[in-house]
């Protein structure tokens, strides 16, 4: 999978921590716990993403923030104010719905001005603010259009204008790209991101698309079965996943499970590999024979032609294996190899094009190649 | 995807499947709906006669002469005799209030069914449809059993002490409306339900999110969006209500003279077929007004959606 370039940390623009505090929020439907004691703290002007597969509770959590769902327990504090018991229509929170939820019987201007009319804002002022919001999303010429006449991307921008026009303290984005064609998503992500940065609103986004979360968010939380598995910057979660779930959810990875060779040791016996795995650090509190899971990203695995017996012993620095090329995928800037180990296990390796250029002959189907990856690229995930 | 889609597939020289699909119901309506109606129209321009059938022919061939006799007598009677005007007025009035009560009762019911959880929803819908499994006439007779002086309703009222003498619940306006609303409620609930259940639930939620009070959500979003369903339901109730015969006959009072009863007595008591036929023609013309209006509303909302 293509991991896009991680934008530089924008933390300098962020305001104080704890602007939005989610404290031990749980939600049960009948006997099913959908959100299980989730706590979050989001900074002012931060763009925070909740990432997880469908049914993990992220959408319910978002609806709780909007007031469309009541939490079974827990509190939500926004800008120092406990908003848990404030009904949806009085919260300084607005949401951009997954389907955009534009009112089909109102034109664009009436859609955007809807929230202001409910507040009783003067007519002239409504027009001014609607124009301003439409200009912000570059939809100025469409005030009189009906939603059905707009393209998906235009509808999304109108929905964004409608959710920003009331100047909410918190903007909720529910899968903002899912209704768009894959082709225009990347461009839209960029545009949406820059509009939101210009406005400086605090955002909480829900998505199942890790690319979307990583491009747009300052920080993200990986959710699974109602709990937050890991939280951090996209870079942190990608480079140092704390569980097998977040390692596999964010990007693609190779996971090995083996038994620790000695008490507090740093070597793993893995039946899928011929040689024991050297860990980056000793597991001081672990016992011999304990099951340990490690992850190594496909781009960390290097390929070379097998060298024979003369290779020097660098097992402290590299883990090595041999595999047969089973599948090759040309991905543009790199080539994806599926390699079958003698144990039958298949590993993924991403090899940059410029590295392949140095191979003389590119490894082809059925070729046996040597695999090695730096000990430091291994992450213990369980 | 390439290649012809099934809808464009056809035998050479024969019209396509789509034409057939439209032609079959079209022919059915033509033969069993339009033709009988044209016959009725034809009779309305004839004159009553004491033979079988009890009306004169429009075309006559007598003495080597073909004559075409178009009589407007029946229509003149209808527009000059007050009884027809008051019967039409009373029919429209009863149909109007029946529709209104059905809407007020049926909208919340349809909304409740549409927002019920899936399992319960089918059960509630079944409850609406279930009466159709019994003959309409039997159900109206069942209401006689409920509403008569010694009926279920009165015994309940007497037993609970609300009253010590039976209350007259039928052969008056109360009975008429009870029967009408009961019979026509499903025709209001079902189209409304169909519209409400497919309405995007995120629309009222978005309204709430943007600061609308619950009543504002209803009047600015839910109600306008269910307007086509309301129109459909109202027409489905109003149109057959106007010509209703059985309910006013069995549950209404003698003074509730609706057009259906006038037609019946013209047809069976006075054997005045042309008059009954003309009354029908005028009623259909009357009902065409709301129907045409509905068509226009539908095409307008269709253009938006």
Image (cartoon, coloured by chain):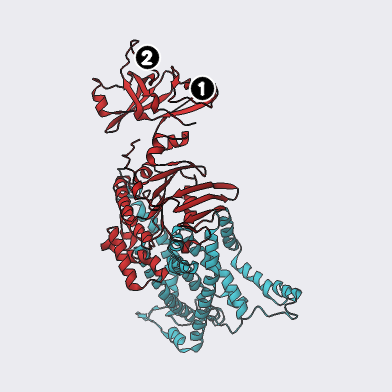
Chain colours: A red, B cyan
Instruction: Please give left or right for residue B73 compared with residue B132 in the image.
Output: left
B300, above or below A372, in the image: below
Q: Report in which chain the residue with disc 1 lies.
A: A
Residue at position x 49%, y 64% in the image: B192
Task: Mark 1 or mark 2: name the one nearer the start of the chain.
Answer: 1
Q: Residue A304, percent across and down? A: 31, 20
Indicate the chain on which mark 2 is placed.
A
- Report the front residue among A167 and B95: A167
Percent across and percent down for residue A203 are: 39, 52
The picture quadrant where one finds residue B251 is bottom right
Please provide percent x and percent y for residue B246: 58, 74
- Quadrant (top left/top right/bottom left/bottom right) for the N terminus of chain A: top left
Residue bearing the label numbered 2: A313
Closer to us: B184 or A48: A48
Reading the image, the residue beneath label 1 is: A260
Judge whether residue B129 can be spotted in this image.
Answer: yes
* Within-10-Å neighbours for mark 1: few <14, some 14–19, many 20+: many
Element class at badge 2 = loop
- A82 vs A239, left or right, is right
Image vertical order of residue A270 relative to residue A101, above or below? above
Q: Looking at the image, which residue sits at the far top?
A: A309
């Amino acid at each position: 999978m293509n991991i896009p370039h991680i934008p530089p940390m924008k933390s300098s623009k962020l305001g104080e921590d704890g602007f939005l505090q989610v404290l031990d929020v749980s939600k049960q439907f009948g006997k099913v716990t959908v959100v299980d004691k989730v706590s979050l703290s989001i900074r002012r002007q931060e763009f925070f993403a909740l990432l997880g597969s469908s049914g993990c509770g992220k959408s319910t959590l978002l609806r709780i923030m909007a007031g469309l769902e009541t939490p079974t327990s827990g509190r939500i504090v926004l800008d120092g104010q406990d908003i848990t018991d404030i009904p949806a229509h009085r919260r300084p929170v607005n949401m951009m719905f997954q389907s955009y939820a534009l009112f089909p019987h109102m034109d664009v201007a009436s859609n955007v001005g809807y929230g202001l009319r409910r507040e009783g804002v003067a007519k002239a002022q409504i027009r001014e603010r609607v124009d301003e919001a439409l200009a912000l999303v570059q939809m100025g010429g469409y005030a009189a259009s009906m939603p059905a006449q707009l393209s998906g991307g235009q509808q999304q921008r109108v929905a964004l204008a409608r959710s920003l026009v009331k100047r909410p303290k918190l903007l909720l984005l529910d899968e903002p790209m899912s209704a768009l064609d894959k082709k225009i998503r990347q461009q839209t992500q960029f545009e949406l991101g820059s509009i939101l940065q210009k406005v400086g609103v605090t955002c909480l986004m829900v998505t199942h698309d890790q690319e979307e979360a990583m491009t747009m968010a300052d920080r993200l939380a990986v959710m699974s079965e109602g709990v937050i598995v890991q939280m951090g910057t996209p870079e942190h979660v990608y480079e140092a996943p704390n569980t097998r779930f977040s390692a596999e959810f964010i990007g693609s990875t190779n996971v090995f499970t083996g038994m620790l060779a000695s008490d507090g040791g740093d070597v793993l016996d893995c039946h899928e590999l011929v040689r024991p795995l050297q860990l980056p650090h000793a597991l001081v509190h672990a016992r011999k024979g304990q099951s340990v899971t490690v992850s190594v990203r496909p781009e960390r695995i290097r390929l070379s032609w097998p060298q024979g017996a003369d290779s020097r012993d660098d097992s402290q620095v590299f883990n090595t294996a041999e595999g047969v090329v089973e599948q090759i995928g040309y991905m543009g800037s790199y080539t994806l190899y599926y390699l079958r180990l003698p144990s039958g296990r298949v590993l993924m390796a991403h090899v940059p094009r410029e590295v392949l250029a140095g191979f003389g002959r590119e490894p082809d189907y059925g070729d046996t190649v040597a695999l090695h990856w730096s000990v430091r690229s291994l992450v213990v995930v369980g | 995807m390439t290649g012809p889609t099934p809808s464009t597939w056809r035998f050479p020289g024969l019209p396509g499947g789509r034409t057939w699909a439209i032609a079959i119901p079209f022919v059915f309506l033509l033969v069993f709906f339009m033709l009988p109606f044209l016959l009725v129209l034809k009779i309305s321009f004839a004159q009553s006669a004491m033979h079988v059938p009890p009306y004169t022919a429009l075309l006559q061939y007598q003495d080597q002469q073909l004559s075409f006799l178009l009589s407007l007598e029946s229509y003149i009677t209808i527009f000059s005799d007050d009884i027809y005007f008051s019967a039409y007025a009373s029919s429209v009035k009863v149909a109007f209030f029946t529709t209104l009560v059905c809407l007020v009762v049926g909208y919340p019911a349809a909304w409740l069914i549409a927002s019920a959880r899936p399992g319960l929803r089918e059960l509630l819908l079944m409850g609406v449809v279930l009466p159709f499994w019994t003959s309409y006439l039997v159900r109206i007779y069942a209401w006689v059993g409920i509403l008569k002086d010694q009926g279920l309703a009165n015994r309940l009222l007497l037993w609970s002490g609300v009253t010590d003498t039976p209350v007259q619940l039928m052969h008056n306006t109360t009975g008429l409306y009870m029967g009408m609303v009961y019979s026509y409620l499903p025709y209001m609930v079902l189209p409304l339900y169909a519209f409400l259940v497919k309405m995007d639930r995120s629309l009222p939620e978005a309204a709430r999110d943007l600061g609308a009070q619950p009543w504002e959500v209803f009047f600015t979003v839910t109600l306008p969006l269910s307007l086509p369903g309301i129109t459909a339901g109202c027409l489905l109730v109003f149109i057959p209500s106007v010509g209703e015969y059985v309910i006013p006959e069995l549950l209404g009072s003698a003074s509730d003279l609706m057009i259906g009863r006038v037609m019946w007595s013209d047809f069976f008591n006075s054997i005045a077929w042309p008059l009954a036929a003309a009354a029908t023609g005028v009623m259909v013309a009357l009902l065409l007004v709301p129907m045409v209006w509905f068509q226009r509303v539908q095409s307008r909302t269709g253009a938006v959606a």
